[in-house]
Image: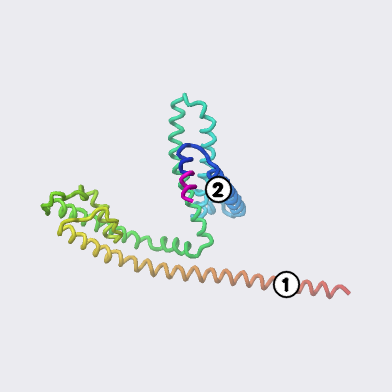
Amino acid sequence: MNEQVSLLVCAIQQGECSQLCFNIFVVETICVAWFSFEFLLRFIQARSKCHFLRTPLNLIDVAAIFPYYISLLVDLVSTKDENQKSNSGRSSYLEKVGLVLRVLRALRILYVMRLARHSLGLQTLGLTMRRCRHELGLLLLFLFVGMALFAPLIYLAENELTSNPNRGLDFQSIPACYWWAIISMTTVGYGDMVPQSIAGQMVAFSSILSGILLMAFPVTSIFHTFSRSYLELKEEHLKNLHGHVAMLALQCPSSSSSQDSVQNHNP
């Protein structure tokens, strides 16, 4: 598997298409064709076209499908212009378009978001994010305040309050210390920037403890909102399921009664 991935990377870097690359392209083409067909059917059956296009899940579908057609069109145009490389302006334009094309190809990861139509968990996550806008903003505010407080402190402790000749190797500037503050307050701890002095270690301990306490307050509210949203969506799905079952139950007796009436009329 690793050899196949390395061959695919080499083929992409050299601008060539191997058999594996071609197979992936065929699979992607089939998937995009099915997604496009399904999207067009839903668009045709929609009562309000504007409301259909403003729906978040439909916007995700558009953002996931259109990059394929744009990249295909740009590839065709660039292939036709390969014999006209003497035109420097045209080639530089294609290079800029190629950069945009690589960004658009990265949007293919939005295919995963299509699972939100059929996943109760992803729907709950989206509903929770929409309902907890204020709590999320409060969480970011807490992180920003802590980052603005502990980044200058760790820079001061590691560069000014120590006599170590190797001081300040990791903490060379206050903006660089912002990264350390974020990693420490979120208790990730990559270990790429480590305080060496006693004062720096005390600042690190304070930042970690403050991050745990500050993040605990809004996270609790977000958790309760997630649980409540999950129960609401689950009840709504159960009601819809019971409604479909009731409609089928009403249709079945009507069809059976019509068959009995036909049999009664026939001698």
- Tell me the amino acid under the disc marked 2: Glu
Quadrant housing residue 191: bottom left
Residue 62 is one of the magenta-drawn residues: no
Residue 4 is one of the magenta-drawn residues: yes
Of residues 110 and 224, the one nearer the viewer is 110
Q: Secondary structure at mark 2?
A: helix
Residue wearing tag 2? 28
Q: Along the horizontal axis of the image, is 20 left or right of 266?
A: left
Extent of the magenta region: 1-7
Colouring rule applied to residues: rainbow
Q: Residue at x 46, y 41 (%)?
A: 10
Q: Secondary structure at mark 1?
A: helix
Report the magenta stretch's main SS: helix
- Tell me the amino acid under the disc marked 1: Ser
Q: Earlier in the sequence, mark 1 or mark 2?
A: 2
Which label was assigned to residue 254? 1
Distance between the Cα atoms at labels 1 and 2?
46 Å
Find residue 158 and report its horizontal and vertical position in percent.
16, 53
Q: Residue furthest right?
A: 267
Find residue 100 and report its horizontal and vertical position in percent.
44, 40
Of residues 135 and 26, the one nearer the viewer is 26
Q: Along the horizontal axis of the image, is 248 left or right of 182?
A: right
Q: Residue at x 51, y 63 (%)?
A: 119
Find residue 256 and report its horizontal and vertical position in percent.
75, 73
Of residues 222 and 73, the one nearer the viewer is 73
Quadrant housing residue 208: bottom left
